[in-house]
Image (cartoon, rainbow, N blue to C red):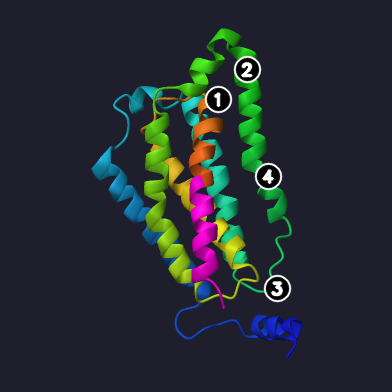
Amino acid sequence: MKTADFIAALAADPSPPGPPLSRRFLIALAAGALISACAFLAMVGPRHDIARAIGTMRFDWKFVDTIALAAPTGLTAWRLLRPDAELGWLAAALAAPIVLLGGSVIMELMMVPSDLWLARLIGSNAVHCLTLIPLLSIAPLAALLLAMRAGAPASPALAGAAAGLVSAGIAATLYATNCTDDSPLFVATWYTLATAIVVGAGALAGRKVLRW
Protein backbone atom coordinates (compact mmCIF):
# COMPACT_ATOMS: atom_id res chain seq x y z
CA MET A 1 0.00 0.00 0.00
CA LYS A 2 1.31 3.45 -0.90
CA THR A 3 1.90 5.96 1.87
CA ALA A 4 -0.79 8.30 0.54
CA ASP A 5 -3.32 5.44 0.46
CA PHE A 6 -2.37 4.44 4.00
CA ILE A 7 -2.89 8.00 5.27
CA ALA A 8 -6.23 8.20 3.46
CA ALA A 9 -7.34 4.97 5.13
CA LEU A 10 -6.37 6.27 8.55
CA ALA A 11 -8.15 9.54 7.94
CA ALA A 12 -11.30 7.70 6.87
CA ASP A 13 -11.38 5.64 10.10
CA PRO A 14 -9.35 7.49 12.74
CA SER A 15 -11.34 6.56 15.84
CA PRO A 16 -9.50 4.21 18.20
CA PRO A 17 -11.35 2.05 20.75
CA GLY A 18 -12.52 3.91 23.84
CA PRO A 19 -13.66 7.52 24.28
CA PRO A 20 -13.56 9.79 21.22
CA LEU A 21 -10.19 11.39 20.59
CA SER A 22 -11.62 14.87 21.09
CA ARG A 23 -12.85 13.91 24.57
CA ARG A 24 -9.49 12.37 25.47
CA PHE A 25 -7.76 15.52 24.31
CA LEU A 26 -10.02 17.84 26.32
CA ILE A 27 -9.74 15.69 29.46
CA ALA A 28 -5.95 15.63 29.13
CA LEU A 29 -5.85 19.40 28.61
CA ALA A 30 -8.08 20.07 31.63
CA ALA A 31 -6.25 17.57 33.86
CA GLY A 32 -2.83 18.89 32.89
CA ALA A 33 -3.89 22.50 33.49
CA LEU A 34 -5.41 21.59 36.87
CA ILE A 35 -2.25 19.78 38.00
CA SER A 36 -0.14 22.73 36.91
CA ALA A 37 -2.40 25.16 38.76
CA CYS A 38 -2.14 23.11 41.95
CA ALA A 39 1.64 22.89 41.58
CA PHE A 40 1.82 26.63 40.99
CA LEU A 41 -0.19 27.40 44.14
CA ALA A 42 1.92 24.98 46.16
CA MET A 43 5.24 26.37 44.90
CA VAL A 44 4.76 30.13 44.64
CA GLY A 45 1.21 31.38 44.18
CA PRO A 46 0.15 34.81 42.90
CA ARG A 47 2.19 37.91 43.64
CA HIS A 48 1.42 39.67 46.90
CA ASP A 49 0.14 42.83 45.21
CA ILE A 50 -2.03 41.14 42.61
CA ALA A 51 -5.16 43.00 43.74
CA ARG A 52 -3.43 46.29 42.98
CA ALA A 53 -1.87 45.00 39.77
CA ILE A 54 -5.15 43.86 38.26
CA GLY A 55 -6.48 46.59 36.03
CA THR A 56 -3.09 48.02 35.14
CA MET A 57 -2.35 47.94 31.43
CA ARG A 58 0.97 46.07 31.48
CA PHE A 59 -0.20 43.39 33.93
CA ASP A 60 -3.45 42.70 32.10
CA TRP A 61 -1.76 42.64 28.70
CA LYS A 62 0.44 39.72 29.75
CA PHE A 63 -2.68 37.56 29.87
CA VAL A 64 -3.83 38.75 26.47
CA ASP A 65 -0.50 37.50 25.12
CA THR A 66 -0.47 34.17 26.96
CA ILE A 67 -4.10 33.31 26.21
CA ALA A 68 -3.61 34.31 22.58
CA LEU A 69 -0.83 31.70 22.55
CA ALA A 70 -2.68 28.92 24.37
CA ALA A 71 -6.03 29.07 22.55
CA PRO A 72 -5.04 28.70 18.87
CA THR A 73 -2.17 26.33 19.60
CA GLY A 74 -4.52 24.07 21.55
CA LEU A 75 -6.82 23.88 18.53
CA THR A 76 -3.81 23.32 16.30
CA ALA A 77 -2.51 20.43 18.40
CA TRP A 78 -5.93 18.79 18.26
CA ARG A 79 -6.26 19.25 14.51
CA LEU A 80 -2.78 17.87 13.84
CA LEU A 81 -3.85 14.50 15.24
CA ARG A 82 -5.34 13.61 11.86
CA PRO A 83 -2.92 12.55 9.12
CA ASP A 84 -4.78 14.69 6.58
CA ALA A 85 -4.87 17.78 8.85
CA GLU A 86 -5.16 21.22 7.27
CA LEU A 87 -4.75 24.24 9.50
CA GLY A 88 -6.90 26.61 7.45
CA TRP A 89 -7.79 29.73 9.43
CA LEU A 90 -5.70 28.50 12.35
CA ALA A 91 -2.57 29.36 10.39
CA ALA A 92 -3.56 33.03 10.65
CA ALA A 93 -4.65 32.68 14.28
CA LEU A 94 -1.21 31.35 15.18
CA ALA A 95 0.23 34.72 14.21
CA ALA A 96 -1.97 36.50 16.78
CA PRO A 97 0.37 36.13 19.79
CA ILE A 98 3.33 37.29 17.68
CA VAL A 99 1.46 40.34 16.42
CA LEU A 100 0.08 41.22 19.85
CA LEU A 101 3.43 40.82 21.58
CA GLY A 102 5.27 42.71 18.86
CA GLY A 103 2.75 45.54 19.04
CA SER A 104 3.06 45.78 22.81
CA VAL A 105 6.86 45.91 22.55
CA ILE A 106 6.64 48.77 20.04
CA MET A 107 4.29 50.66 22.35
CA GLU A 108 6.66 50.10 25.29
CA LEU A 109 9.60 51.44 23.32
CA MET A 110 7.57 54.51 22.42
CA MET A 111 6.39 55.17 25.98
CA VAL A 112 9.53 54.38 28.00
CA PRO A 113 12.77 56.41 27.81
CA SER A 114 15.53 54.53 25.97
CA ASP A 115 17.82 54.53 29.01
CA LEU A 116 15.29 52.29 30.78
CA TRP A 117 14.87 49.75 27.97
CA LEU A 118 17.61 47.38 29.14
CA ALA A 119 16.44 47.43 32.74
CA ARG A 120 12.88 46.65 31.66
CA LEU A 121 14.11 43.82 29.44
CA ILE A 122 16.33 42.19 32.08
CA GLY A 123 13.84 42.67 34.91
CA SER A 124 14.32 40.80 38.18
CA ASN A 125 12.64 37.45 37.52
CA ALA A 126 14.39 36.04 34.46
CA VAL A 127 15.63 32.90 36.23
CA HIS A 128 12.20 32.27 37.76
CA CYS A 129 10.59 32.68 34.35
CA LEU A 130 12.98 30.28 32.63
CA THR A 131 12.48 27.76 35.45
CA LEU A 132 8.81 27.94 36.35
CA ILE A 133 7.26 28.05 32.89
CA PRO A 134 8.98 24.82 31.75
CA LEU A 135 8.24 23.16 35.11
CA LEU A 136 4.58 24.14 35.01
CA SER A 137 4.39 22.88 31.42
CA ILE A 138 5.35 19.31 32.32
CA ALA A 139 1.91 18.14 33.44
CA PRO A 140 -0.14 19.47 30.49
CA LEU A 141 2.52 18.40 27.99
CA ALA A 142 2.70 14.86 29.39
CA ALA A 143 -1.09 14.56 29.55
CA LEU A 144 -1.54 15.86 26.00
CA LEU A 145 1.13 13.58 24.54
CA LEU A 146 -0.47 10.61 26.27
CA ALA A 147 -3.88 11.46 24.84
CA MET A 148 -2.46 12.29 21.42
CA ARG A 149 -0.96 8.81 21.08
CA ALA A 150 -4.44 7.71 20.02
CA GLY A 151 -4.18 9.97 16.95
CA ALA A 152 -2.14 9.64 13.77
CA PRO A 153 -0.32 12.92 13.10
CA ALA A 154 1.46 13.20 9.76
CA SER A 155 4.35 14.88 11.60
CA PRO A 156 4.80 13.60 15.17
CA ALA A 157 7.43 16.24 15.88
CA LEU A 158 5.15 19.07 14.70
CA ALA A 159 2.24 17.73 16.76
CA GLY A 160 4.52 17.47 19.78
CA ALA A 161 5.71 21.04 19.25
CA ALA A 162 2.09 22.21 19.10
CA ALA A 163 1.41 20.40 22.37
CA GLY A 164 4.45 22.18 23.78
CA LEU A 165 3.09 25.54 22.67
CA VAL A 166 -0.29 25.10 24.32
CA SER A 167 1.38 23.73 27.48
CA ALA A 168 3.69 26.73 27.61
CA GLY A 169 0.72 29.03 27.11
CA ILE A 170 -1.04 27.47 30.10
CA ALA A 171 2.11 27.65 32.23
CA ALA A 172 2.85 31.23 31.20
CA THR A 173 -0.69 32.29 32.10
CA LEU A 174 -0.24 30.83 35.58
CA TYR A 175 3.24 32.26 36.02
CA ALA A 176 2.13 35.72 34.88
CA THR A 177 0.04 36.05 38.05
CA ASN A 178 3.25 35.70 40.08
CA CYS A 179 5.71 37.63 37.92
CA THR A 180 6.27 41.24 38.98
CA ASP A 181 7.98 42.12 35.68
CA ASP A 182 5.09 43.38 33.59
CA SER A 183 7.04 45.10 30.82
CA PRO A 184 6.38 43.72 27.31
CA LEU A 185 10.14 43.83 26.80
CA PHE A 186 10.56 41.28 29.60
CA VAL A 187 7.66 39.15 28.37
CA ALA A 188 8.90 39.15 24.78
CA THR A 189 12.37 38.06 25.87
CA TRP A 190 12.06 35.64 28.77
CA TYR A 191 8.57 34.22 28.26
CA THR A 192 9.52 33.53 24.66
CA LEU A 193 12.75 31.78 25.64
CA ALA A 194 10.91 29.67 28.21
CA THR A 195 8.29 28.79 25.61
CA ALA A 196 11.00 27.78 23.15
CA ILE A 197 12.39 25.33 25.72
CA VAL A 198 8.98 23.69 26.12
CA VAL A 199 8.35 23.60 22.36
CA GLY A 200 11.72 21.93 21.79
CA ALA A 201 10.95 19.34 24.47
CA GLY A 202 7.53 18.74 22.94
CA ALA A 203 8.96 18.25 19.47
CA LEU A 204 11.59 15.79 20.70
CA ALA A 205 9.07 13.86 22.78
CA GLY A 206 6.52 13.92 19.96
CA ARG A 207 8.98 12.31 17.55
CA LYS A 208 9.14 9.26 19.83
CA VAL A 209 5.78 9.17 21.59
CA LEU A 210 3.53 10.06 18.63
CA ARG A 211 5.28 8.00 15.99
CA TRP A 212 3.07 5.46 14.22
Name the residue nearer the viewer: 53 or 206: 206
Can you say whether 24 is above or below 70 in the image?
below
Query: Looking at the picture, which amino acid does disc 1 mark?
Result: Leu
Measuring from the top left, give residue 169's x and y in whole percent.
Answer: 49, 46
Question: Spatial distance from mark 2 to mark 4, Cα to Cα?
Answer: 21 Å
Question: What kind of element bears circle 4?
Answer: loop
10 Å neighbourhood of mark 1: few (<14), some, or many (≥20)? many
Q: Which residue is mark 3?
A: 84
Question: What kind of element bears circle 1?
Answer: helix
10 Å neighbourhood of mark 4: few (<14), some, or many (≥20)? few
Query: Looking at the picture, which amino acid does disc 3 mark?
Result: Asp
Question: Spatial distance from mark 1 to mark 2, Cα to Cα?
Answer: 8 Å
Membership of 210 in magenta stretch: yes
Task: Give the mark, 2 or 3, whose residue is nearer the N terminus.
Answer: 3
Can you say whether 181 is above or below 15 in the image?
above
Question: What kind of element bears circle 3?
Answer: loop
Image point 51% across, 27% down: which residue? 186
Measuring from the top left, give residue 85's x and y in whole percent.
Answer: 68, 69
Name the residue nearer the viewer: 190 or 20: 190
10 Å neighbourhood of mark 3: few (<14), some, or many (≥20)? some
Q: Which residue is mark 1?
A: 185
Task: Give the mark, 1 or 2, whose residue is nearer the N terminus.
Answer: 2
Q: Give the mark toward the camera: 1 or 4.
A: 1
Q: Which residue is mark 2?
A: 109
Question: Spatial distance from mark 4 to mark 3, Cα to Cα?
Answer: 22 Å
Membership of 74 in magenta stretch: no
Q: Which image quadrant is residue 104 in? A: top right
Q: Which residue is mark 4?
A: 95
